[in-house]
Amino acid sequence: MVSIKDVAELAGVSTATVSRVLSGKAGVSAALRAQVEEAIKALDYRPNLVARTLRAQQSVTVGLIVSDICNPFFTDVSRAVEDTLYAAGYTVFFCNADENPEKERLYLEAMHAQKVAGLIYSPTRQQTENFEALEILIPTVILDRAVPSAAVDMVLIDNEDAAYRLTRHLIENGYRRIGVLLGAASTTGRERYKGYERALQEYGLSPAQQLVFYQPPRVEDGRSATMQLLESPVRPEAIVTTNSLLGAGALLAIRERGLRVPEDIALASFDETLWARLVEPGVTIIAQPTYEIGKTAAELLLQRIQDPERPARKVILQGQLVIRGSSAPRAAGPPGKG
Amino acid sequence: MVSIKDVAELAGVSTATVSRVLSGKAGVSAALRAQVEEAIKALDYRPNLVARTLRAQQSVTVGLIVSDICNPFFTDVSRAVEDTLYAAGYTVFFCNADENPEKERLYLEAMHAQKVAGLIYSPTRQQTENFEALEILIPTVILDRAVPSAAVDMVLIDNEDAAYRLTRHLIENGYRRIGVLLGAASTTGRERYKGYERALQEYGLSPAQQLVFYQPPRVEDGRSATMQLLESPVRPEAIVTTNSLLGAGALLAIRERGLRVPEDIALASFDETLWARLVEPGVTIIAQPTYEIGKTAAELLLQRIQDPERPARKVILQGQLVIRGSSAPRAAGPPGKG
DNA sequence: CTGAAAGCGCTAACAA
DNA sequence: TTGTTAGCGCTTTCAG
């Protein structure tokens, strides 16, 4: 391992001079600078960031802990975070907590231990409930999932409103018995339930307990819950799923049962994904502004790093209702009782 | 920032003793151990991994540089890598090179600079061509994309064979004029082209130049290339796409033109994805063993870290042909000339 | 079993 | 403009 000392020796200067050249500081004569640069090349020297971080007590890497790297929502957001932070000269390290609170704590510790300059993070529900206990000492921006603490920057979407609009859309198109699949791992599931409930109540409908499922956000869990829904004595006329993995699972189950969308059962979900665009009919969704979310989070973090004392902000973005065939108006007087 | 020194002071011992307790080493009396543990708790001490890494000259983090975090193939592989390495006590940091050689080099440098214990990495084509020039000094396993150097561990699939089987399947089902969309960013595109070519030749067909497209692996590029293909004077009877993003783009274009699959045009692609399963008819694909790939890569890396001198291995896995409706046998004597 | 001390590679005062 | 030097927080000989 070649160090700054070796470079200094070869160039016939002190390590301080090498360090100055490396960090592009002024105050080094052109001659010495050239010598040093030559030595760096000759030795193929690579700076040791670990030592630099230890000494400088700050790094140029930022951590991004996402709940599930297989969920397109998070990968889309991640891209935006990365673009923005890369442009600002930071290196981004992703970690996948896999909706596992234990893994999440481990990665949180790893981020502290690595002394990252900042952290962007979407906590599981367990952690949001006791956020202060995590004792996060790094500049942090919370993503997607609200924590009760007011003392931290957050970027969220208005989940209740989004679910409300999605549900109302179904009701207005003639659907009455509406099942709902909610993510069990996050706070967003609860919030989206409220929106669903409010829409029903506004139209004088009451949410039936057996139509409401809280599931881990995975395709298989979406499938199995939908199977139950489809087999219930009074099958729902429509299903709302609050993330794309549950949505895909629901559609899988619907296909397996040989039902048609929307004639036999309507479907509406969250998140723009390839499958929602490509299936026929397309699936009505709430499109979350993923790029905007990621970009905003990165920008907030940059500001927070620069000024740790600034008051915390909570940015709330709106989802966009994208109407497709899966929720087309219900035909009047179908086989059922209408 | 509370350090080992503070703990030592409070516990009334030396820093060496604290260090011993921290690393769970034997040779500390129960009494002192208890004192130290108490002090750690009282001060809420968190070890500084940066300092530890600097001193020990090795870390417990592993880097994973993927080409595109939005490509489900890579996220699926990543999950497997993470599972395996997490079980072995490592922390995984992902980086997204975004098919951008410059970003890739930056992250490679970052990994060196952070002194990660190991690296798993899928290089862009530019880097594979000049792999030695990257001067990677960390235990490394190459993923998905072959490099000519024999001196590095690799986990690949037999791309030529996979593309051959996929193409042959189409030919056997009666398709003759077959267009192909290949990824331009990687070596896999070239290899898959060979398989495509071999299948055609075996059946006495010759690949027409205007049916072959090398595209960046993105949905939009798949769409635009397919548009061209569909507008060509002699429209192909089938399209092969060699990754899921290009495949999704192709299907998007087919839909936009109002064509039916497979009656108007057949489709076969690579990679199992939600959309390929959910569209109707389902899309015939080569399923890559993503979990196996990731797990194998992680295992190879673990062995490489343990024994840097061991001879390099190249593990080649097989893709699996999954036949669905999108490539159903061609109806005899259709509108065209048959 | 325990502590003193050296040093990992680097940066930033402070001197010269 | 350049060099000397003192650590950043930790581990690990080497003595005791």
Image (spheres, coloured by chain):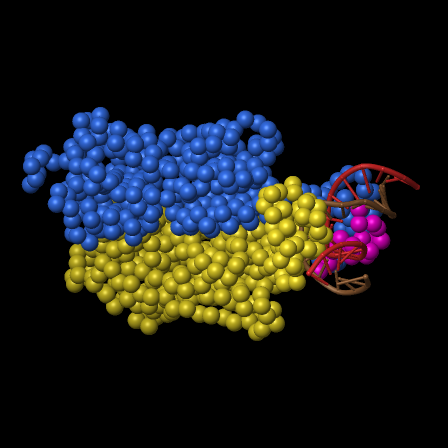
Chain colours: A blue, B yellow, C red, D brown
- The residue positioned 56% from the left and 55% from the top of the image is B61
| Residue B302 picture location, percent across and down | 53, 65
Magenta: predominant secondary structure element?
helix
- Image point 70% across, 46% down: which residue? B9
> With B170 as the anchor, is B157 left or right in this view?
right
Q: Is residue A22 left or right of residue A257?
A: right
The front one of A66 and A87 is A66
Question: Residue B77, located in which quarter of the rendered image?
Answer: bottom left
Residue A2 within the segment the image draws in magenta: yes
Quadrant for the N terminus of chain B, please. top right
Q: In which quarter of the image is the C terminus of chain B?
A: bottom left
Residue drawn at (17%, 56%) of the image: B335
Q: Residue at x 33, y 68 (%)?
A: B165
First to last magenta residue range? A1-16
- x and y percent of residue A20 in the render? 77, 44
Q: Is residue B116 magenta?
A: no
Task: Tell me residue B31's x, y (percent).
Answer: 64, 55
Confirm whether residue B144 shows in the render.
Answer: no
